[in-house]
Image (cartoon, helix red, strand yellow):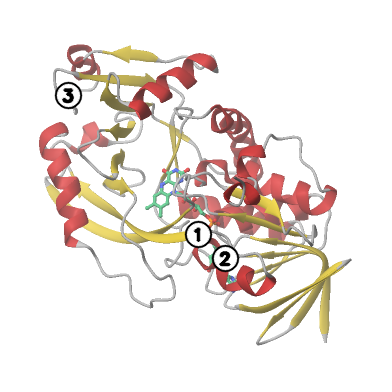
Amino acid sequence: MTETADLIVLGAGAAGSAAAYHAARRNLRVVLLEQFEIDHQRGSSYGASRIIRYAYDHPAYVRLVSAAYPAWAELEREAGETLVYPTGGVDIGRRGEPPFEATLQTLRDEEIPFELLDPAEAERRFPQFRLDADMLMIYQADAAVLPASRCVRAHVRLAEQYGAVVHAGEPVQSIELRDHGVTVRTARQTYSAAAMVLAAGAWANDLLAPLGFPLPLRPVRCQENYFAPLHPASYETGVMPVFVAHLPEYPFRPYGLPSLDGSGFKLGQHGGPDFDPHRAGRPMDEDALASVRQFAERHLPGATNQHLSSRVCLYTMTPDEHFIVDAHPAHPNLIVGAACSGHGFKFSPVLGSILVDLATEGVTLHDISLFRANRFSED
Ligand SMILES: Cc1cc2nc3c(=O)[nH]c(=O)nc-3n(C[C@H](O)[C@H](O)[C@H](O)COP(=O)(O)OP(=O)(O)OC[C@H]3O[C@@H](n4cnc5c(N)ncnc54)[C@H](O)[C@@H]3O)c2cc1C
């Protein structure tokens, strides 16, 4: 028998769980299909923490973050739990380095308040850091930590409370697109709906390629590393800012987040080697661990005093590291939210809302022109 709905959402990561929540909240009949369990550890959206911050090198993201903050606040109210933990954020870099300069310029252009600190002032304000003499620090007070797994679970829980039907452990095997509808098959059931949101993360091309809509996606493995610092109290949320280091000597930007709910101080690198998401195991990478330790020895002494754990997580990169949020070129009832390129979590409540706008109205009030799928095929 075929189960019918208004909207099928594929994938219960950050994007899909948020889309299911927004659709159900708008009184749509929603089916959310996830191949693994909710909050599993094989995709991109699980774990202790993610950064939300205005500091970006492109105005489109700053504007989207401005919409994301109130969306998170609304989710917190509905979920009845704290999901945004203010802690401030810093970017460190050198004058003249393009990503650092672009971030400064965007904050200025978008009139986001920030402070620019020289090394002495930076180390006085944030004694956890050691900066080289030619470095600067941008401080932006609104940056915060999001408890990733709890956010995804809150979206799924509230979607169900609004009536969404959630099927975990049910991989979608095929999608059939018609002019006025979508049919989806799993080993268990056939589903049919007027529209579909496909938010399949690193697995997206398994489903999009047979639909004639392959995207230039590159899944890569990234590693989160957790530490007990020498002075743990200085690395707690509310004391230690989140940080991103724009330093060309590190091919993948080092970043860090304070400890949240006993997680330990988290250090990672923005990027990593290609990785096949179908591989069952996610073994730890000793080189990635050594690299963040090396950064900490120079710029965060004592931060990596004791290694607690490391976990592999996937990024799904596009060539320009901008998202893809668009409809199938021949079937506007299939909306793809993909390739968040390692920075999509902070936007998930607003991204979910945009995906539902596109699936139901074909348009959204948000400016998503940067995320068109056909930008890679243009001259
Ligand atoms: C280590 C790490 C740190 C990060 N830090 C930040 C940060 O600080 N700030 C920030 O904003 N972003 C950050 N990100 C990026 C952010 O987490 C991701 O952009 C976001 O989680 C992507 O969510 P998604 O829903 O697109 O993908 P996923 O979470 O991978 O979800 C896709 C889902 O689709 C399911 N699926 C796939 N195929 C099928 C199928 N055939 N049938 C059914 N289900 C299917 C998968 O199982 C999966 O659950 C980080 C990412 C990582 C890995």
Q: For the residue carrying disc 2, how many other residues have a C-alpha within 10 Å: few (<14), some (14-19), or many (20+)?
A: many
Asked whether, in this view, residue 241 is left or right of residue 299, the answer is right
Q: For the residue carrying disc 3, how many other residues have a C-alpha within 10 Å: few (<14), some (14-19), or many (20+)?
A: some
Q: Check whether the beta carbons of the residues at disc 1 and disc 2 lie within 8 A of each other.
A: yes
Q: Nearer the N terminus, badge 3 or badge 1?
A: 3
| Of residues 68 and 376, the one drawn nearer to the viewer in this rendering | 376
- Residue 229, position as x, y percentages in the image: 16, 41
Dot 3: what SS? loop
**With respect to residue 308, does 236 lie above or below?**
above
Asked whether, in this view, residue 371 is left or right of residue 342, the answer is right
* Furthest residue in direction front, as rendered: 379
**With respect to residue 320, does 100 lie above or below?**
above
Q: Quadrant of residue 157?
A: bottom right
Residue hosting label 1: 217
Nearer the observer: mark 3 or 2; the answer is: 2
* Furthest residue in direction right, as rendered: 180
Residue hosting label 2: 204
Q: Indicate if the residue with disc 3 has its beta carbon within 8 Å of ligand 1.
A: no
Amino acid type at circle 2 is Ala
Which image quadrant: the C terminus?
top right
Asked whether, in this view, residue 200 is left or right of residue 186, the answer is left
Label 3, label 1: how far apart the Cα atoms are: 36 Å
Q: Indicate if the residue with disc 2 has its beta carbon within 8 Å of ligand 1.
A: yes
Number of numbered discs = 3
